[in-house]
Image: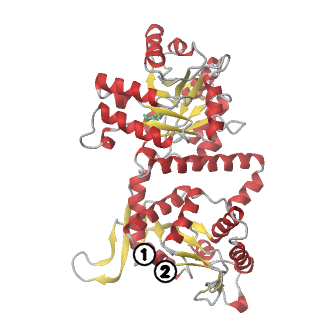
Amino acid sequence: MASFASQSGHGFFDKIASRVEEVDSLLMVGLDPHAAELGEGNNHAAGAKAFCLRIIASTSTVAVGYKPNAAFFEAFGAEGVAALKEVIAAVPEGIPVLLDAKRGDIGTTAAAYASGTFEELGAHAITLNAYMGVDTVDPFLKDPARGVFVLCKTSNRSSNELQTLPVGNSGKALFEEVASLCQSWNKDNNVGLVVGATDPEALARVRAAAPDLWILAPGVGAQGGDLDEACSAALDERGMGLLVPVSRGISRADDPAAEAVALKDRINAARKRCTDQRKEPAAAAASTTTTALLPYQREFIEFSMSHKVLKFGDFSEGGEAFFELKSKRQSPYFFNAGLFCKGSALAKLGKFYAEAIMNARPRLEFDVVFGPAYKGIPLGAAVAYTLADLHDRDIGFSYNRKEPKDHGEGGLLVGEDLKGKRVLVVDDVITAGTAIREAFGILRKEGATPAGVVIALDRQEKTGAESVIGTTSAVQQVEEECGVPVVSVVGMSHLTEYMASKEDATPGANAQALEAMRAYRAKYGVG
Ligand SMILES: O=c1ccn([C@@H]2O[C@H](COP(=O)(O)O)[C@@H](O)[C@H]2O)c(=O)[nH]1
C-alpha cells in the first residue's frame, strides 16, 4: 500500500499544499484506463494496470497526486478492483492518491465505503456526492490525514439541471449552498470541492462561498476548460487552493511524460499571470504584450532551428551574420517555413498552431479553419486534425483553389461549407498582408465572417522603405483594417527573449547575435 503518513494535527490538505510546493505543480494526473486507450488484446484488468503504471512512471515528478477513476477498474469486475489496489500501491510514497468514486450513502454504508477506500484500497482521499447530507460525509472525515472532495458544480453539460437551481430566497444556487456547507464541515483541513473548469463563473462563486477550501477543477483539455479563467476564478489569496486534474489530455498524448511537463508549465504560467494581475493589474496587462516565453514557444523555436527554418545571425569567422529581406533590410534572423517539408514536421506544426489558438486571449471563436492556397492548405489541415485529436474540437476545414475547376464539383472552394460561419485563417507568415486580404475577400463572398488569423511567426516590424519607415507592422495593419485578431505561435520578441535566455545560460556565446536582434528591434520593431 502506498504510504501517506499523517503528521499529527495535519489535515489532508496540508499534505497537498506541501506536495504542491515540492513539485511546483497544480497538476493531478488522472488514471482513466478507457477501453479505447488500452488497445486490442489489452482490454482487461492487467492491461488497465499496465496502462496506469506507465502513466505513473512517466509523470511522478510533476504530479501533485494521482486520481484513478474507480469506474474504469470496476468495469473489469473483481480483477479490475484488484488492479486498482495494485495501481494505488504502485504510486510512489508521499504522493497522494484521490479515488474518484463519487460515493454517497447513509452513514453506516458510508462508513463501509470509507473503510473500503482508505483501509482496503489504500487511497488517501475520495470524491463524494453530498446530496444526502453531512452524515454521508462524516465517516470519511474521521482521520484528518484522509480527505474528501465533495461534488459541487461538476464539469458536465447537464450539471445545470440541478446544481444551479436557486435555494430558498437567498438568491444562491444549490452548488453555492454545497460550497458553504463544506466550508463549515472543514474542521480538520480535509474537505475540498469539485468544481468544473468548464464554468469559470461558478468557480468564482464557489471561491467566494468557500474561501479556505481546495478546489479540484476537472475539464481542462478534452472538455475544453480554460486555464487562465480557471486560475483567476479559483486560486485563493495565496495563489493556492486549486488542483487541475487531467486524464485523457495526458494519456492520449504522443508523449505523456512531455505532455505532463507541458501541462504543469502551462498551468504555472496561467497561475503566474493571475497572481501578477492581482498584484499589479496595469503591469500585468502590459507584460502580456511583451514576452513571457511559454514552453511550447521555446520548443517551436528550437524545432524551427533544427529544421533550418529559423536561422539566427552567425557572428563567427566566415559566418552569415545578416540576411537580406525582400525589403532590403538586413535582418539578424531568417525564417523560411517552406523548409518544413516532412510529415513529422507537419504533425508538430499542427500542435504548435493549436497551442497558439488555445492560448490566445481574448479567445478565438470560430467554426471553420481555412487554409488559403497554397501554403495554407497543409497547415489548415494539420491544425484541424490536431484540434480534433488533442483538443476535442472537431471543426470543419476548407481551402481554395487558385484556378477554378470546370468539371466535377467545380468552383474555387473545397471542404466545409462556409456560409454563415466564423472562419479562422491559417497561414505561415504575414509579409505585406496581401494573401490574407485576398483570403478574407473569398470568405466574405461566400457569406462567411473572418474570425481571426493564426500564423507561425509575427516579425513585429514596421513596414515601409528605409527613407519612410512606417509606424505599424503588416500584422497590425491587418488587425486594424479587417477588425480581426492575428495570433502567432511566436513573435520577434519571443525570438529575442530566447536568445537572451541562451546568453544568460552561456555568457558570451550569443552576445553579438542578441545585440543584433535588439538593435534591429529598436530600429524597426513594434509592440
Ligand atoms: O465534474 C467532474 C467530476 C469528475 N470528473 C472526472 O474527471 C476526469 C476527467 O477526465 P478528462 O479526460 O481529463 O476529461 C474523469 O475521470 C471524470 O469522470 C469530471 O470530468 N468532471
Q: Is any atom of residue 10 visible in this view? A: yes
For residue 479, side relative to residue 368 (left or right): right
> Does residue 316 lie above or below 494 as drawn?
below
Where the C terminus falls, by quadrant?
Answer: bottom right
Query: What residue sits 68% from the left and 30% below the top?
Result: 211
Q: In which of the image's four quarters is ligand 1 placed? A: top left
Which residue is the site of mark 1? Answer: 372
Q: Residue furthest front?
A: 317
Q: In which quarter of the view is residue 177 placed?
A: top right
For residue 334, side relative to residue 446 (left or right): right
Pointer 1: residues within 10 angstroms few (<14), some, or many (20+)?
Answer: many
Are discs 1 and 2 less than 8 Å apart at CB?
yes
Query: What residue sits 64% from the left and 84% below the top?
Result: 322
Say if disc 1 is inside 8 Å of ligand 1.
no
Q: In which quarter of the view is residue 312 placed?
A: bottom right
- The image's colour scheme reads secondary structure
SS class of the residue under badge 1? loop
Q: Measured from the top left, where is residue 163 in percent x and y?
A: 50, 29
Q: Measured from the top left, where is residue 38 in percent x and y?
A: 31, 41
- In the image shown, does 167 or 45 lie closer to the viewer? 45
Which residue is the site of mark 2? Answer: 435
What is the three-letter code of the residue carrying label 2?
Answer: Ala
Mark identifier at residue 389: none
What is the three-letter code of the residue carrying label 1?
Answer: Pro
> Does residue 248 lie above or below 113 as drawn?
below
Task: Name the N-terminal-most of marks 1 and 2.
Answer: 1
Q: Measured from the top left, where is residue 119 in percent x and y?
A: 47, 15
For residue 309, side relative to residue 463 (left or right): left
SS class of the residue under badge 2? helix
